[in-house]
Every structure is written in C-alpha cells, then in structure tokens.
Image: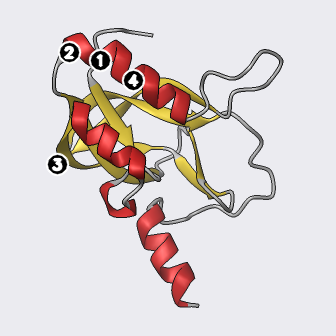
Amino acid sequence: MSQDIYNLFVYGSLRSGFRNPVYQYLTKYFHFVGEAVVKGKLYDLGEYPAATATTEEHFISGELYCINNPLEFSWAIGQLDDYEGVNAEPGERPWYKRDEVIAYHQGEPHTAWIYWYNGDISGKPEIESGDLMQYLQRKNKT
C-alpha cells in the first residue's frame, strides 16, 4: 500500500448525512473535498453496508476527504482502521480491509483509500443505486 495517499473515500456511516459520532473525528483530521463515486458494488448487511470492488461499470456514491496535515495521516487513518474493524484480534477475521481506489470527483480521478468489505456477501441484497443514503431513505418510506 502506498503511503503517499492522503485522500479518503467514504460511502457509509462516515458520510456527513449520517451524523455518526465518528464523523466528528473524521472532520477533525480531514476536510471535505466533495461528492464522489468509485467503481464497486454496495450491499445491505442490515446494520451496515458492504462495498466490494468490481470491474463492471457500476459505481458507489460517497464523499471524498483529504487529510488536513499529512504528518498526522498515519495516526488518523489508524484510528479509522480500528473503527472499521481492519485490525482484528488474533484469530479473528478483519471485517474490512483498506485499499487504494480511484475516486471520481467532478469527473476528475483522485487516488484515495476505501474500506472494502472482507466477508461473504452471498444472499445479501445489493443496493442497485450504489447510494446508501438514497437507499435508506426509500427503505424507510415503506
């Protein structure tokens, strides 16, 4: 993994609209660049979403952030790795893995970090729109 990437793409509970307490942490160390998309598929696991990489022309909607101070990046992303379950206990499987991705903001490509789901999505409903916020709004209306 490259250590020169200071952008972060979020698609779930870390998006601004969710008002997750961890979002306050995120905005302490990262600033909002704008809405963005990445190539991938999104699934509904019930309590949280799962994103998986794909080579198909299918996109996940989310937000792009950039670190405020590159010297704080290792520590800040480490805290988010803990939140996302990247650092599992010995003998346990990590829930997510952090990986590089190309995020498109206003049509321009930006290399960013993303948290891909590291488990089985068999039988889980796909969020066809690729937009968790939109999906939950529709789901909550029914």
Q: Which of marks 4 and 2 is nearer the N terminus?
A: 2
Please state if 68 lies on the left or on the right of 11 as rendered: left
Would residue 37 be seen by someone viewing this image from the given angle?
no
Check whether the beta carbons of the residues at disc 2 and disc 1 lie within 8 A of each other: yes
Q: Distance between the residues labelled 1 and 4?
A: 6 Å
According to the image, label 2 marks what residue? 70
Looking at the rendered structure, the kind of residue marked 3 is: Gln
Q: Which of 24 and 39 is in front in this view?
A: 24
Check whether the beta carbons of the residues at disc 3 and disc 4 lie within 8 A of each other: no
Q: What element carries label 1?
A: helix
Q: How far apart are marks 2 and 3 (CA)?
A: 24 Å
Q: Distance between the residues labelled 4 and 2?
A: 11 Å
Which mark is on residue 106? 3
Q: Distance between the residues labelled 2 and 1?
A: 5 Å
How would you rate the neighbour count of disc 4 (Cα within 10 Å): few for under 14, some for 14-19, many for 20 or more?
some
According to the image, label 4 marks what residue? 77
Check whether the beta carbons of the residues at disc 1 and disc 4 lie within 8 A of each other: yes
Q: Earlier in the sequence, mark 3 or mark 4?
A: 4
